[in-house]
Image (cartoon, rainbow, N blue to C red):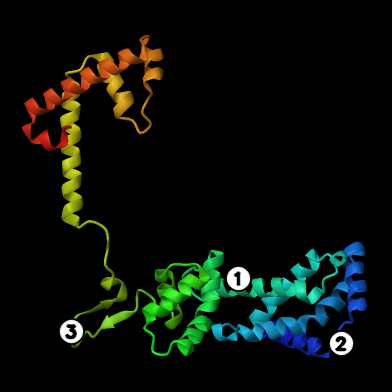
Amino acid sequence: MSRQIANNSLVRAAMKAPYLQREHEHALTVRWKERQDQEALHEVVVAHMRLVISMAAKFRRYGLPMSELIQEGHVGLLEAAARFDPGRGVRFSTYAAWWIRASMQDFILRNWSIVRGGTSSSQKALFFGLRRLRAKLARLVPGAPDRVLFDRIASTIGVSSADVALMDARLSAPDQSLNTPVGDRDDGPSGERQDLLVSDAPLQDQTVGGTIDGERRSRWLREAMEFLDPREREIIERRRLRESGATLESLGDRLGVSKERVRQIENRALAKLKIALLERHPDAAPFVT
């Protein structure tokens, strides 16, 4: 309640604040820039709160409270005042409008949906421009299918048609919890929305089968490694069985031989492994190259 009262007071003060003439505005921004004059800052900010309120009204269609949009715009206005350079000869309102709009847009993107979206500049343009562009194209090309509209919007903004379709779906319906009940317990099967999601993960029998096969192949390899001498085993372990395989040169330095000799030993060890695997486990043939 106190926040709402503060916002109402801010709006009333903005409506009563006089417009600033260019020379007076310049003098105030210079005082703030050079001497950090708080009175000058207050006068500039209050005089431009009309701009904040006007811009907040344009974003009301996204369903967020007007008071919170005004607060975010006020933050953007203060940021603009902190960064403004009066020596460039630009009106403060022109410069501040960008910061006010950016602050409101970031707030909308953070709070409009529980799903984070619009992280890139093109995605932000799509989020805030889709409805306007779609309405404009619908007037220019009456009866055009969504696919045609999405392709034109995508080329205009610089995103893919799939991105346009996804954003259109998100803007067309509110967020729904995955725990929302579906079905009717009396008339048929029931559950939650998450029960209807299709999983890309392997089926349980595939997962178990893969685990069993992996353990079996690991056992076969351990048994075959017993046929190698210590130097061959070390080379295979360091070259083939570690996430970051050792180089021929580093192994040559370690063993006191040339890297070409390491290559020869490695090839011989791999051949011995293949023979040992196939002799003891003929089923390993599909896994041996």
- Give amino acid for label 3: Gly
Label 2 near label 3: C-beta < 8 Å?
no
Asked whether, in this view, residue 61 is left or right of residue 274, the answer is: right
- Residue where numbered disc 3 is placed: 188
Q: Which residue is drawn at 76% across and 69% down?
A: 80
Residue 155 at what x, y percent from top left? Answer: 47, 71
Disc 3 or 2, which lies upstream in sequence?
A: 2
Pointer 3 local density, CA inside 10 Å: few below 14, some 14–19, many at least 20:
few
- The answer to whether 178 is drawn above or below residue 56 in the figure is above
Disc 1 or 3, which lies upstream in sequence?
A: 1
Residue 8 at what x, y percent from top left? Answer: 73, 88
- Residue where numbered disc 2 is placed: 18
Q: Residue at x 83, y 90 (%)?
A: 16
- Give amino acid for label 2: Pro
Distance (Cα) linking label 3 and label 2? 67 Å
Asked if residue 2 can be seen in this view, the reply is: no
The answer to which quarter of the image holds residue 42 is bottom right
Disc 2 or 1, which lies upstream in sequence?
A: 2
